[in-house]
Amino acid sequence: MTAENDTVDSEVADPTPERSLPDNEVLRGLVEAFDAAVWAPSHGQDVVSIPREDLAELAGAAKAAGFEVCADVTAVDWYRRRRPRYEVVINLLSLEHRLRLRLLVPVPDDDPSVASVTPLWPGANFAEREVYDMFGINFEGHPDLTRILMPDDWEGHPLRKDFGVGAVPVQFKSSHKVT
């Protein structure tokens, strides 16, 4: 091998792209602590995508960093558009730091479950129950994961994009009887 070849080999660029990090030191500390966390700004908000295996630990770190409010927990069904099929969306708020943080957690359809954030933010209780009821996503560690909107004996999850609609006829007062 010649000296010329050594120079070419040493100039080969590192194949891993530089990790994008937020300017805010609180958010930067959160993202840097988790190798799999991916930060990106979206419409003026800070968004962190995190694997579901890291959700409980990242949520605990966020709470310790000053995110005292869980404003919302919801989900998205990406049926036939994206893999994994579901995404849990958790919106956090820090009054102390005047920051908002949106966590995105991909959830596969063959095991629709994530860690509950209710032990950290008790106000997430009803939002997690609604996501369970409407999408069928289980929140592990939730104190009372039961239906909240649909009757207890309801079969299925109405906000899943593959849920059949129109199966129950609606009878209006002035219309003819449906038979």
Image (tube, rainbow, N blue to C red):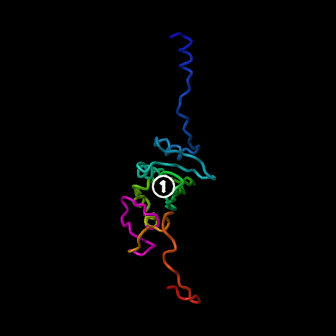
**Residue 23 position in % (x across, y down):** 59, 43
Q: Amino acid at mark 1?
A: Arg
135 part of magenta stretch: yes
**Residue 108 position in % (x across, y down):** 44, 53
Q: Residue furthest front?
A: 179
Q: Secondary structure at mark 1?
A: loop
**Residue 70 position in % (x across, y down):** 49, 60
Whether 85 is drawn above or below 136: the answer is above
Which residue position holds label 1? Answer: 85
Count numbered badges in the picture: 1
Which of 27/8 is in front? 8
Residue shown at 54% from the left, 14% from the top: 5
Which of 42/152 is in front? 152
Dividing the picture into quarters, in which one does residue 141 lie? Answer: bottom left
Whether 104 is drawn above or below 37: the answer is below
**Residue 85 position in % (x across, y down):** 48, 55
Task: Name the magenta segment's main secondary structure.
Answer: loop
Q: Residue furthest top?
A: 2
Q: Residues within 10 Å of mark 1 (few under 14, many from 20)?
A: some
Whether 22 is drawn above or below 121: the answer is above
Residue shown at 46% from the left, 73% from the top: 149
Which of 102/80 is in front? 80
Q: What segment is highlighted magenta in the picture?
A: 133-152
Residue shown at 38% from the left, 62% from the top: 142
111 part of magenta stretch: no
Residue shown at 37% from the left, 58% from the top: 140
